[in-house]
Amino acid sequence: MAARKKPVKKSSPKSAASANRFNLKGTLIKLFLIGALVVAGLVAIWAYVLNERVVDRFSGTLWKLPATVYAAPQEIYVGQHLSPSELVSELTNLHYRDRNDLTETGTFDRVGNEIRIHRRAFDFPDGQEPDKQIRVRFVNEDVVGVTDANGADIGISRLEPMMIGQLYPDVNENRILLSAVQVQKDAPLLIQTLITTEDRDFYHHHGVVPSAVLRAFLVNLTSGHTVQGGSTITQQLAKNLFLTPKRTIERKVAEMIMALEMEWHYSKDKILEGYLNEVYLGQDGSQAIHGFGLAARYYFGRPVDELRPEEIALLVGMVKGASYYNPRRNPERAKNRRDTVIDLMANNGLISETEAGVLKAKPLGVLKEKGTTSPHPAFLNLVQRQLAEQYNPEDLKTKGLRIFTTMQPRVQAALEKSVTVLNGIEKAHKYAPDTLQTAGIITSIGTGEVQALIGGRDPTFEGYNRALDAQRQIGSLIKPAIYLTALSDPAKFSLITLLDDSPVTIDQKGSEPWTPKNYGGQFLGPTPLYTDLAESRNVPSIKLGMDVGLDNVADTLHKLGGPQIKPFFPAMLLGSMTMTPFTVAQIYQTLSSDGFYSPLRAIRSVVDSQGKPLSRYPLTVTQVADPNALYLLQYAMQGVVSDGTARRLNKTIPPSVGVAGKTGTTNDSRDAWFAGFTGNRVGVIWVGRDDDKPTSLTGSSGALPVWAAAFKPLYNKPRDMTPPKGVSFQRVDVALQARVPAQCQGILMPFISGYEPQAVQDCQGNAPDGTPGAPADNNPLSPILNFFH
């Protein structure tokens, strides 16, 4: 019997649909899980990449640090010529505060002829000097005592050097690094105020505060635009170091991930230190101001440990928006923000309510000038060039080197101010304003240190540096090299040797004969050598140069520090060659130093960011000329000022200083020069036009007034004219070329020993036993010369 088939049970449409839904749900769950895993994997990879960036940045160099350039420090010692007003000016330039109470560093108090100073600590190349209270006592314009607060003699002290510029990296941002530990010790109110204002739970969260992020999200969502950020200090640092300011969800997520990673790897102090140095606090031209260290200097001229509570409040308030709350451009807005921070400080117990009221009544107190751009670009340019001889340019801009230079701020200020003399010169000669240009350099005798340098009429202009790059004809500045060459041959030449001042024509190969003339066109016949130099007479100087030999003059010029010129043509005896003011200063530096050549230098030492000395620039000295012959030349160059082409200088600088120098004027008065030296400094000034067109100026009327204005406010040490052992003074009759007794009319003149005039005459020009009682010496130089003798 056939088996009976079971009836097939048909599923209902309802159950089929339920199964499909179950299958779809499972598929979706699978897809979701797969997607979640993929997203998690991608986020993990993203987080890994972000973590690598964090670790790589923090384990290396966080920032490219510019090299910082300092002026020479102001030294204070017993016996120093320094007036109380000059010291006060130096302290003011360093932004010391005038206070009766010296408990804080960076303060001073003057009472009569005593100045009390609480000197700041500073890490000098030769070691760290702590902050210290010192007392300086004066008598007139001399330091007579330097003691500590207890009255113990300390002999010598020094202030911290003035920062005169920085060599910036290509990233166009700048900062002064702070240590979080040091700030917590020296300026705890800064950190307390920052945390109170920006992130009160900084020491309790792990980089991100979810409730704050959610709250900010809801507020921004309901308002339709960004109102709150909800970022912790760690998140802000992550954004500033690694991300762009663009507000997107992707950037916000990256910011939170990196914040968590930073908190995982590094301590709170490390993160806080990064924030203190990275936060953006303003703009100085093309350079961004980052960190509180630089901001304190930029806005107040002081280190962070000297900031007052209201100044701290201003800087912390600017974190919210440095441009929006810029105190120079938006002072009212900045003050409102500062006062808000002061209220927060009071509400959180950092200051009292009474203190808050007093602080809010105070002005912003920011500096009028901007505090980071170098006000001395020409000098800084010289520093860069000398550094380039030894350092890689990239290292100079990124390794945080500290460069200690030779610049003397007081001398630099005097040189910069002297250019205003050109306004009067242009007016007197009816030139259009700014027709004339100038360049100048002042160096220290003996050391070759460049104390001041300007590259143009506008000392703050960062462009063409005429002191280093302007090749101009030097005119009569060449003549000391001619006369030194002659005086180095004492058997043939002395200061009273008669030179022939009469017309001459010189044949020149390949060109027409040359017939030089004197300035003014007159010829005086036989004239003594010292007079020809003092009056800068061309023809006798040319004849002298031809006599001693052109190659010998060229060799002397090169030994003094000038370029090596071959061939040396006769016209060069009148300075037809070109040199920069810097090169001229090198030549006259050697002339002022008794024939000892020292390369001009603008740098004393270089140290790395940790204070380790890298390079020192020691004084090197080479004798290149006979000191006896140099003494005779300096004596004659002193006559240039006392009786010669630079005699108008006596109206500004006392004759007792004994300035020696030389004026220089080129063809058609295209260039006007004066190079001169006192007992402690050498100065060279050039005046002319950039287009090289003629002027009506000479060295005496163009350059000399600028030189005088630069040196007038400075201490000018009288020149020591004590002759070396190889020189003796003799009273002589120049016309007779003979020695005469002391009572006779004549002049006192130095000679190299053994080469004095052999002839001896009495007062009537007869044998030595003639009748005495000659008229008195009427040479105006004699009192000074006798004094030095």
Image (tube, rainbow, N blue to C red):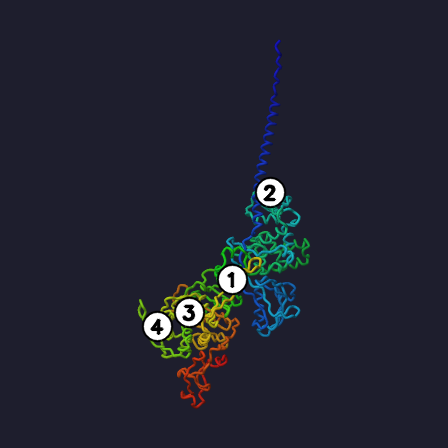
Q: Nearer the viewer, residue 267 or 309?
A: 267
Q: Amino acid at mark 2?
A: Leu
- The dot on residue 185 is none
Total marks drawn? 4
Regarding mark 2 in the picture, which secondary structure is present there? helix
Quadrant location of the N terminus?
top right
Residue under pointer 4: 516
Q: Which residue is mark 2?
A: 221
- Residue type indicated by callout 4: Pro
Q: Which of label 3 and label 4 is nearer to you?
A: 3
Other-residue count near label 2 (Cα within 10 Å), few / some / many at <14 / 14–19 / ≥20: few
Helix, strand or loop for disc 4: loop
Q: Residue at x 62, y 23 (%)?
A: 15
* Residue 353 image point, x, y percent: 68, 57
Name, please, the residue furthest toward the front.
754
Task: Specify whether 404 is left or right of 109.
Answer: left
Three-letter code, disc 1: Pro
Picture quarter containing residue 547? Answer: bottom left
Marks 3 and 1: in contact by CB < 8 Å?
Answer: no
First in residue order: circle 1 vs circle 2: 2
Of the numbered discs 4 and 2, the one sitting upstream in the chain is 2
Residue 407 sits above or below residue 273 on the image: below
Nearer the viewer's eye, disc 1 or disc 4? 4
Residue 17 appears at what percent x and percent y?
A: 60, 24
Task: Tell me, for residue 375, which label it has, or none.
Answer: 1
Image coordinates of residue 267 in percent, x first then y, are 63, 50
**Which secondary structure, mark 1?**
loop
